[in-house]
Amino acid sequence: MLTGERTLWRKVPEVTAVFWVVKLLTTALGESVSDYLVNSYDPYLVVGVGFVVFAVALVLQFSRVRYVPWVYWFAVVMVAVFGTMVADVIHVVLGVPYLVSTVVFATALALVFVIWRRSEGTLSIHSITTRRREAFYWAAVSASFALGTAAGDLVAYSAGLGFLAAGLVFAVLFSLPAVGRISFGLNTVLVFWAAYVVTRPLGASFADWTGKSVGGGGLGWGDGPVSAALGLLIVVLVGYLQATGRDVDRTLEPVR
């Protein structure tokens, strides 16, 4: 840690069952909201506004000295929404194949982890108590989201599995880190980040399956209604966390 660097209360929530539920809902929301907005309005305007709201969400998160549920999850939602828009631009507009983007984002995430580990000595989310560590954390969150987006599209489209089959594949992959932790005592940090990456393609696959047309391999519920339902669920759960503080570690003291 740099001498004189300001220290904070921990800026991330406790990893509970509710954490994973909300995280999965945000990844699904990012997929459905992005698709709905881009297909319903001018895509250039939508991406521009998305970037502004994304930036505001991160500034708001960094301005706090401790974890605040609605602020933190607002930032996560905007990473999901704007990240999906960027991923679509990379593939649809720039024509980058899913396999290439998957490799590029996997490399980017690995570099973030390597630099973070060398700089701070740990990748644990329980150590997010300085601005620099928080910056590393959000860089990893963004890179993991990008990787999950590319990998999810690679499986669903390039591999031809379709939304439901891809979702089931990622559901199995999501469970493997927990099995490894329980059965083989895998490192908790490794387990967390492995599961975290998979939440994106898992949530997005089921969002596409429910929202896309029957002819497109979905149930035909529509991206708009799916977005509204997911948004309502997130508001309810985050409101519960905000009101109860159930995901705040109250044993922690500010680092001196």
Image: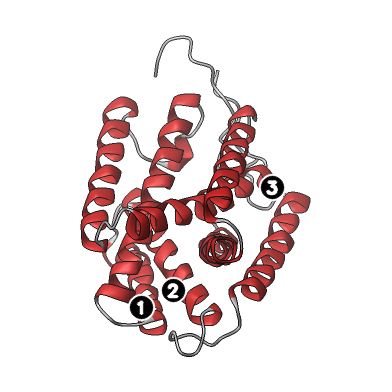
Left or right of 134, for residue 46: right
Specify the label residue 205 is tagged with: 2
User: Looking at numbered disc 3 in the image, what kind of residue is underneath it?
Assistant: Trp
Q: Amino acid under label 1?
A: Ala
Secondary structure beneath label 1: helix
Q: Position of residue 157 (x, y in %)?
A: 31, 75
Please identify, in this view, whether the residue under mark 1 or under mark 3 is nearer the observer.
1
- Considering depth in this image, is 23 or 175 the residue closer to the camera? 23
Percent of width and height locating residue 229: 68, 72
Pointer 2 local density, CA inside 10 Å: few below 14, some 14–19, many at least 20: many
Kindly check if marks 1 and 2 are in contact, taking CB atoms under 8 A apart as contact.
yes
The amino acid pointed to by label 2 is Ser
The reply to whether residue 160 is in sight is: yes
Question: Which of pointers 2 and 3 indicates the residue nearer the eye?
Answer: 2
Residue behind mark 1: 166
In primary-sequence order, the first of circles 2 and 3 is 3
What residue do we see at 29% from left, 59% from top? 185
Please tell me whether mark 2 sits on a helix, a strand or a loop: helix
Residue 253, relative to residue 47: is it above or below? above
Which callout, 1 or 2, points at the residue further toward the start of the chain?
Answer: 1
Instruction: Check residue 70 in the rendering and tell me which mark sits there, or answer none.
Output: 3
Q: Residues within 10 Å of mark 3 (few under 14, many from 20)?
A: some
- As drawn, 71 above or below 234: above
